[in-house]
Image: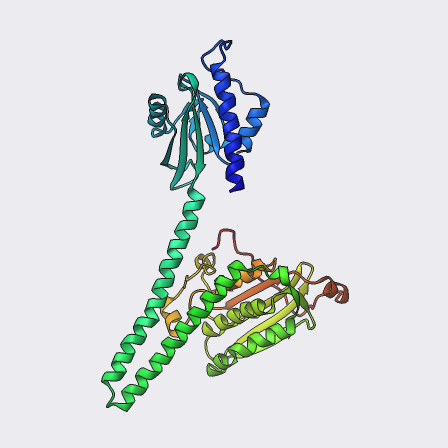
Amino acid sequence: MWVAIVVGVVVGFIVGWVVGRLSAPAAPQPAPRGLSLEVVSLIEALPEIVIIVGPNDIVQHASAGASALGLVRAGVITHDAVAPLIRRARMTNTISDNVIEQRRPAPGRGMISLAVRVAPLREGAVLLTVRDLSAASRVESVRRDFVANVSHELKTPVGALTLLAEAAEQAADDPEAVRHFAGRMQHESARLGNLVRDLIDLSRLQSDDPLSHASPVDVDGMVEQAIESVRTAADARNITIVDSGTPHLVVEGDEGQLVTAVRNLLANAVAYSPEHTQVTVTTLLTDEGIEVAVRDQGVGIPVHEQDRIFERFYRIDPARSRVTGGTGLGLAIVKHVCANHGGQVTLWSVPGEGSTFTLKLPATQEVLRVTNTPADNFESTAVPLREGVS
């Protein structure tokens, strides 16, 4: 609200100043081209783009962003939809608010939405303020997609449970069929429970700042809790989990969030590894902080998929995710946990050879003082993901 008030005051000042200059009787031209440095500084400081158009349709001043968006070129408004707005403002002598679409200037692609306010000044001059709505539109699009995805993901297990319950009721005289349907119901119930849990975790992560109430977290204990949470699933598939690396490390943060992040990486490693293989959890102190790496001998991740695996609900193999009960939110949660703790998650993977996910977290000063050299029995092969991943 305060930002809007300040912007309104500044715009009002600029409009008043321009009106005064344009209406001054001593001016040799209908609308002087020059603006004082103070007014130019005020215009450039505004979040909106400001364009002042003279009575002859020549742009007298435009914020730097006007050219970047392709609105002004060689002192002339270039967008076809803006010229009628200027003419209407002159004819009606009223302020109007409009939304226009235009192609993003090269090398960008796609369309952008612009909110344009047109205000008439004296002697045919017009003031335009322009705001790029693209970022807000993207956020709204992400929100709509998220709601749609959540609705779809919830409907799937709920619908399956309804059908399975009806099938079990109709097969009441067939104990074998009832047992089969009951088993499927347990699977779908677990899937639904996992989804609700992950949605709650993700919601908490987005609204919480763990560093505001951080406490020392024992890395050994954190890893042990995460391993125990997936032990049953690993034993069922004869997958061995090995814990190695530098002991007695400590990080500052929220223990629950950090355990969740490591647990999600381990659950993924177990779900996407063949039976009778090994998953290794390694802790390491480096010059940059503490690394917790989860390495598997699984199917690996193709290079063209690696940029997207941290997106919400993105699955490389949807069919397999349905079988394993994956929600598509586990890695998104890992990414949020790392970001909340001032760290990052990195990935190394080769199809057919397995994957290594590495949590990189800041180390406490106490750990850096006590431990002089990092363990030399582990080499981090993780490579950072490129920017822009959701």
Q: Residue at x 37, y 61 (%)?
A: 149
Q: Answer yes or no: is residue 266 visible.
A: yes
Q: Residue at x 33, y 23 (%)?
A: 92
Pinpoint residue 335: horizontal percent, then vertical percent: 53, 60
Q: Which is more toward the observer, 250 or 236?
A: 250
Q: Which is more toward the observer, 281 or 262?
A: 262
Pinpoint residue 319: horizontal percent, then vertical percent: 35, 69
Pinpoint residue 63: horizontal percent, then vertical percent: 50, 29
Tell me: 265 left or right of 289.
left
Q: Residue at x 68, y 69 (%)?
A: 249
Q: Answer yes or no: is residue 63 visible.
A: no
- Scheme of image coloration: rainbow
Q: Is residue 154 above or below residue 147?
A: below
Q: How many marks?
A: 0
Pinpoint residue 40: horizontal percent, then vertical percent: 55, 26
Q: Residue at x 40, y 36 (%)?
A: 115
Q: Is residue 59 above or below residue 270?
A: above
Q: Which is more toward the observer, 94 or 186?
A: 94
Q: Is residue 150 above or below residue 142?
A: below
